[in-house]
Image: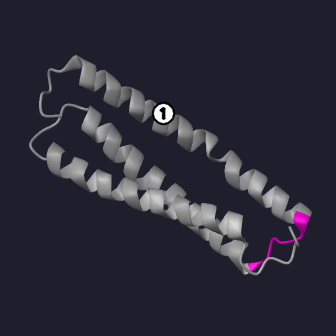
Amino acid sequence: MADPDDQRTAAALGLLHRICRGYAAVGIVVPVFGVATAIGLGVLTDTWLVVSMVLTAGAAAVLLGRVLPVQARLLAPRGDTALQESRRLGMTVGVFNLLWAVVVVLMIVRPGSTTGV
């Protein structure tokens, strides 16, 4: 970002943005399979699963509403605000990752689960 004429860095940033967009598109499969599995196990209304679904929706909102648009803006010709916006993007990505980490822990630990698994 410091050198707008660096084609290698611009190409790498473009690739990372395409990967994030692909991740967002493929990420739709996770809640669909999760709900189907929860129905199969009979745990769809368990608190830990409802919290996980809400956090998953929050993570999707952060990704679609903040991360991808800011990435796209940073790839466009930028002005003096690019560095500041990239720092905010780093924080936003950290929040996104934290939400997913909590979801993963909830899916593994399954507090209050009565499935016996």
Tell me which segment is drawn in magenta. 41-46
Q: Quadrant of the N terminus?
A: top left
Q: In screen coordinates, is 66 left or right of 55? A: left
- Residue drawn at x 16%, y 46% is 83
Q: Up-down: is 43 above or below 21?
A: below
Q: In screen coordinates, is 92 left or right of 7? A: right
The quadrant holding residue 18 is top left
Q: Position of residue 66 (x, y in %)?
A: 38, 53
Q: What secondary structure is marked by label 1?
A: helix
The quadrant holding residue 95 is bottom left
Please state which of residues 89 and 79 is positioned toward the viewer in this rendering. 89
Q: In screen coordinates, is 107 left or right of 6? A: right
The amino acid on which the numbered mark 1 sits, given as a three-letter code, is Ile
- Assign the magenta stretch its main secondary structure: loop
Q: Position of residue 101 (x, y in %)?
A: 54, 61
Q: Which residue is mark 1?
A: 19
Instruction: Residue 54: say if magenta.
Output: no
- Residue drawn at x 48%, y 33% is 19
- Residue drawn at x 27%, y 25% is 10
Q: Position of residue 58 (x, y in %)?
A: 52, 64
Q: Quadrant of the C terminus?
A: bottom right
Q: Up-down: is 56 above or below 79?
A: below
- Residue drawn at x 35%, y 57% is 92
Q: Residues within 10 Å of mark 1 (few under 14, many from 20)?
A: few
